[in-house]
């Protein structure tokens, strides 16, 4: 590998440190260092200067005279007074140093790159916390890697001679991986690959690894989508042997199946789903009873009838825990024969379901409820747009049924918000892709009455199933169950949100937990259709806790439900399969299940859900970068959506696409980052660019490889 290629990578940090470490008594200036490591261009030498400055700030180096540096041996020894040992998670920076996030200390712990001891981003580690003269931060050294967070690394392979290096795409992976010739797996120079670390001796700067998969050439759609999945350790292929096993599953409904199930085949039943959906895991049935009440059935695909515990298909589903939805594809949790055919509630086919059936009066009060296994026959498949047309025009197929359900759903929705439920309705970006997966247009899809209709009845089923088990059917001790829980907002983040929205003229004044939801709902209403809406909504969501799975019920704050679970999507979520199995056991009178397995599965499912969400966002980001490639030179109005020490992020008002304005490119002044006030400020003219400010930008670069869009600020014309 060429020296210049090494300089371009994050390993230049390690190279420079090794130079000072090998000659601790010698002074070096940036020109000498640049010459030693082969930094020949102005940009590379500037990077060397920045690294030397950062090392000085870290007290790794000390400035002997102007422009001359040497290893700060005394500074390191002074840190060796251990205060205590903590456990935390590594948050790696692009510059090669890290912060340890730990519940054991109130501030994140700074770890210089030479104290990382081969720890990588998101690893769980044990850290020596040092006494230090600094008062504004903790410092430490990693002494043990408890758990590696990532097995696979995605990047470009660069071959020199017979061997190669994997140059990771992630900025949070600061090490190139050396690949011996016999571990290249036929990868060609410049291809995008998936690699794995196989060895990393303590005294080695680079880990040794192997190529486990060759994804293809940079910029090709399948290559990039598979790379996103691999980056988050998500599967991008389905094992062929499981597809073969799925083909052996008998889909015939037997006489025994009919006999043990409640029969809904003669009751009006239909589905409402997106126009491109193939896995229909929920249907609604509706009829008016002789007593004047309405019977509404929420029928969910009975996946667990076909997927038995501890089978190969079940084990794969448990490991995946969720389907993953990227811009151009779905990566299913179950084999296609199950998700799109056997279990999918397709029209004009008899299907086995697990159902929640309710009697409601005109005011949507629950008069009676029933849970159990059923057989249904869906007579109509609606898209959301088709159902919306029925609601708006008050005519069409199953008009009376849909209009009544819409009326009941709106009452349920009103009750939910009155009880304190949050009202976040973020518009989702949708892409129109050509045959090669290239985005040709971008639009935003909003939820309408037809979406809300389905949402409210799914929420009703989830809530009532959780109540049925959570209240343990009048026993003192609740039975083991899988809940969907959501904690109260983070007080510090929420207070920051209150301060931030003041600059737009909004006031948030909560006095209690219930008031927080009411005030946030008012804020969401006030910002709707405003230029700052997306930014305010994003910050509001960040102030909230994340919803997770747990066997310990704390309720769902965002929905204002004391009991809540996930029952309605077993085709795409493994926790729903667990809920179906537990509900079936408890309906048959079984004792409470052992907690250990379900506790572990809740933790695993929450982790996999977050990975899937991150991968989905990464695919959207990639398509946004790709979409902007032919927009170089175009000018837009935007709003500052983020402020950092290296630049300001701007979201284009027209399409919600975000890019960065580098501080180095702001040539009218020397700007510095003011973290406390969410702004960058010019030293000479005191010009400020603050989070939420409107600005005008020009697109100067849309870099597929870096997945980054670069803007420059322009004066309004």
Image (cartoon, helix red, strand yellow):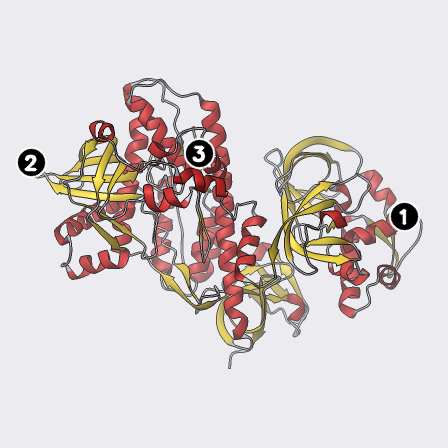
Please, is residue 710 above or below residue 238 in the view? below
Residue 471 placement, left or right of 223: left
Q: Quadrant of residue 558?
A: top left
CA gap, disc 3 to disc 1? Answer: 54 Å
Camera-side mark, 3 or 1: 3
Residue 183, percent across and down? 72, 47
* Horizontal relation, residue 457 to residue 142: left or right: left
Residue at the far right in the pictured view: 25
Percent coordinates x, y for residue 189 in the rendering: 70, 60
Q: Tell me, for residue 291, which label it has, or none.
A: 2
> Which of the two residues, 406 or 561, is positioned nearer the viewer here?
406
Could you say which disc has been placed on residue 142 in the image?
A: none
Task: Identify the residue at horizontal 63%, vertical 66% (top origin).
Answer: 662
Residue 314, numbered circle:
3
Badge 1 element? helix
Percent coordinates x, y for residue 474 in the rendering? 28, 20
Residue at figure coordinates x 22%, y 36% from the top left: 375
- Asked if marks 3 and 2 touch (Cβ < 8 Å), the reply is no
Q: Nearer the viewer, mark 3 or mark 2?
A: 3
* Residue under pointer 1: 22
């Amino acid at each position: 590998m060429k020296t210049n290629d090494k300089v371009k990578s994050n390993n230049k940090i390690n190279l420079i440190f090794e130079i000072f470490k090998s000659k601790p008594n010698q002074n070096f200036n940036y020109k000498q260092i640049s010459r030693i490591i082969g930094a020949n261009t102005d940009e590379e030498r500037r990077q060397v200067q920045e690294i030397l400055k950062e090392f000085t700030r870290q007290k790794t180096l000390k400035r002997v005279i102007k422009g001359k540096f040497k290893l700060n041996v005394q500074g390191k020894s002074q840190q060796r007074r251990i205060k205590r040992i903590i456990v935390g998670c590594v948050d790696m920076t692009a510059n090669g140093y890290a912060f340890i996030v730990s519940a054991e200390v109130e501030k994140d712990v700074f770890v210089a790159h030479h104290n990382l001891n081969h720890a990588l981003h998101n690893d769980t580690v044990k850290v020596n916390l040092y006494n230090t003269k600094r008062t504004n931060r903790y410092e430490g050294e990693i002494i043990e890697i408890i758990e590696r967070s990532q097995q696979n690394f995605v990047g470009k392979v660069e071959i020199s001679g017979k061997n190669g290096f994997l140059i990771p795409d992630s900025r949070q992976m600061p090490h190139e991986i050396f690949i011996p010739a016999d571990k290249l797996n036929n990868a060609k120079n410049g291809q995008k690959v998936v690699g794995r670390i196989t060895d990393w001796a303590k005294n080695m700067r680079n880990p040794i690894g192997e190529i486990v998969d060759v994804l293809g050439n940079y910029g090709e759609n399948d290559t990039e989508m598979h790379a996103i999945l691999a980056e988050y350790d998500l599967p991008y292929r389905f094992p062929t042997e499981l597809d073969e096993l799925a083909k052996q599953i008998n889909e015939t409904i037997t006489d025994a199946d009919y006999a043990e199930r409640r029969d809904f085949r003669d009751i009006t039943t239909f589905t409402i789903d997106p126009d491109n959906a193939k896995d229909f895991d929920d249907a609604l049935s509706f009829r008016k009873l002789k007593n004047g009440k309405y019977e509404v059935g929420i029928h969910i695909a009975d996946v667990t009838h076909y997927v038995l515990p501890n089978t190969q298909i079940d084990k794969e589903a448990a490991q995946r825990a969720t389907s993953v939805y990227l811009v151009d594809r779905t990566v299913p949790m179950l084999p296609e024969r199950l998700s799109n055919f056997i279990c999918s509630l397709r029209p004009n086919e008899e299907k086995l379901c697990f159902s929640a059936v309710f009697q409601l009066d005109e005011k949507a009060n629950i008069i009676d409820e029933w849970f159990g296994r059923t057989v249904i026959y869906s007579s109509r498949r609606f898209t959301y747009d088709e159902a919306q047309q029925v609601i708006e025009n008050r005519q069409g197929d199953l008009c009376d049924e849909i209009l009544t359900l819409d009326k009941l759903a709106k009452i349920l929705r009103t009750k939910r918000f009155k009880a304190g439920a949050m009202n976040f309705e973020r518009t989702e970006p949708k892409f129109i892709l050509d045959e090669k997966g290239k985005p040709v247009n971008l639009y935003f899809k909003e939820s309408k009455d037809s979406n809300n209709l389905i949402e409210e009845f799914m929420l009703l089923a989830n809530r009532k199933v959780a109540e049925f088990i959570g209240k343990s059917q009048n026993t003192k001790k609740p039975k083991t169950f899988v809940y969907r829980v959501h904690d109260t907002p983070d007080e510090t983040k929420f207070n920051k949100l209150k301060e931030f929205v003041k600059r737009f003229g909004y006031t948030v004044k909560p006095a209690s937990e219930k008031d927080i939801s009411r005030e946030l709902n008012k804020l969401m209403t006030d910002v709707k259709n405003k230029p700052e809406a997306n930014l305010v909504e994003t910050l509001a969501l960040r102030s909230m806790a994340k919803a997770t799975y747990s066997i310990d019920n704390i309720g769902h704050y965002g929905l204002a439900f004391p009991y809540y679970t996930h029952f309605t999507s077993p085709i795409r979520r493994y926790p729903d399969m667990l809920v179906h199995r537990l509900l079936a056991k408890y309906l048959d009178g079984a004792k409470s299940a052992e907690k250990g397995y379900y506790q572990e599965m809740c933790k695993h499912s929450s982790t996999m859900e977050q990975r899937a969400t991150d991968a989905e966002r990464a695919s959207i980001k990639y398509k946004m970068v790709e979409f902007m490639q032919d927009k170089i030179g175009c000018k837009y109005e935007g709003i500052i959506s983020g402020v950092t020490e290296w630049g300001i992020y701007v979201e284009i008002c027209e399409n919600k696409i975000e890019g960065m304005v580098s501080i180095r490119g702001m040539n009218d002044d020397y700007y510095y980052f003011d973290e406390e006030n969410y702004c960058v400020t010019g030293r000479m003219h005191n010009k400020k660019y603050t989070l939420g400010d409107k600005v005008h930008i020009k697109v100067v670069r849309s870099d597929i490889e870096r997945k980054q869009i670069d803007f420059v600020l322009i004066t309004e014309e």
